[in-house]
Amino acid sequence: MESEWRGLSLPLMFPIGHNIRHCSLAELEEYFQEKGMPKFRAKQVYEWIWQKKAMHFADMTNLSKELRQQMGEQFTLPALQVDQIQVSEDGTRKFRFRTWDGHFVEGVLIPTELRLTACVSSQIGCSLNCKFCATGYIDRKRNLQFDEIYDEVVLINAECEKEYGRKLTNIVFMGMGEPLMNYPNVMKAIDMITSSEGLRMSPKRITVSTSGVSKMIKKMADDEVKFKLAVSLHSAIEEIRNEIMPFTKSFPLTELREALEYWYRKTKSKVTYEYVVWKGINDDKKSIDALVKFCKYVPCKVNLIEYNPIDDGMFQQASEEATNAYITALEKNNIVAKVRRSRGKDIDAACGQLANKS
């Protein structure tokens, strides 16, 4: 085994420094066969990367030391590293991950009696500019690669097993970034998370949240995805939505409605609307009536989310009376509505607070 690599020139199919996790199993098989080694070596490596969650070539202990060293010279394995974990009074854990190129991105573990949910990021920063979200004030550095998104889940799941003795039950793409602005990497990450070659999680336990990128919602429907869809709506009145989420001028509510109707026709999967009620912005009857009307276009449910202030500016949580008025109106029209209380806001881990602060 120790002499497997000796006297063999490097094949040309991969450049030095190529990310080994961006190789398919078939490509690795071809690679090892070119080096005169048995085909099963590729499967061993592939299993280490995805099923055994190796973060370093040195972890691959059933390969010879020389083989691991040579692989390290040919390939890279740029896994995320946990830089910091903060623990909230309510048990929520915020992870700050360091990328191979020195950037930081955050993820959150939300434990409850019945669920262990990972909230993961898709971008370093965000492509959009929602005024109420801390991430929206961070310049987007780059998209996360699919294997980096996968690492978020792996590392949060490891914390689950360590602290609670059980695995993650759910994943929500509600962290930093707009998932549909990084569509190929998010889809590939979900493929690996749900694959028998990866974490084997059910896609029905995964929710992708978007601020309303209409054309990509249609593409998801065409791609026949099996996970759930959530939309950060926050207002069903065009002028208000454009004010608090300026990018939506490019994705008007008429287009969003059409995309969601298309989504439901193709997938038969209900939509979840994420909605914050703010004082003096959308806490009036006109806003309530507009939301009720919008909810009738496709089968849906509404999560009314407690606001987590990011400054002392224009956005303040509306009164409990205003929130109750929404619930009453929605339930009167047979629309399921729930109030979601914040978790982890004392460590800036709650919805809209992720901004790489420690």
Image: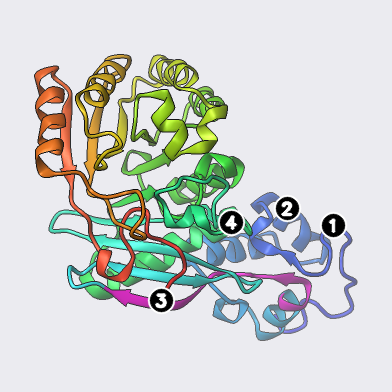
Residue 144's tag is 4
Dot 1 lies on which element? Answer: loop
Q: Disc 2 on helix, strand or loop?
A: helix
Q: Which residue is mark 3?
A: 358
Q: Secondary structure at mark 4?
A: loop
Q: Name the residue rendered at 24%, 32% in the picture.
A: 302
Left or right? Give the position of 76 relative to 250: right
Query: Which three-letter amino acid code belongs to the residue tagged 4?
Result: Leu
The C terminus, quarter of image? bottom left
Residue at the spot x=65%, y=53% of the render?
Answer: 25
Tell me if residue 187 comes above or below residue 70 in the rendering.
above
| Camera-side mark, 3 or 1 | 3
Residue matched to label 1: 13
- Find the distance from the CA under tag 2 to the CA under tag 4: 23 Å
Q: Which mark is residue 27?
A: 2
Q: Quadrant of the N terminus?
A: bottom right
Q: State the image coordinates of residue 256 (x, y, percent, origin top left).
A: 46, 22
Which picture quadrant has residue 58?
A: bottom right
Give the residue type at disc 3: Ser
Nearest to the observer: residue 356 or residue 9? 356
Front residue of 216 and 290: 290
Mark positioned earlier in the residue sequence (1 or 4)? 1
Label 4 and label 3: CA atoms lie apart by 21 Å
* Magenta range: 72-87
The front one of 205 and 4 is: 205
Nearer the N terminus, badge 2 or badge 1?
1
Q: Nearer the viewer, mark 4 or mark 3?
A: 3
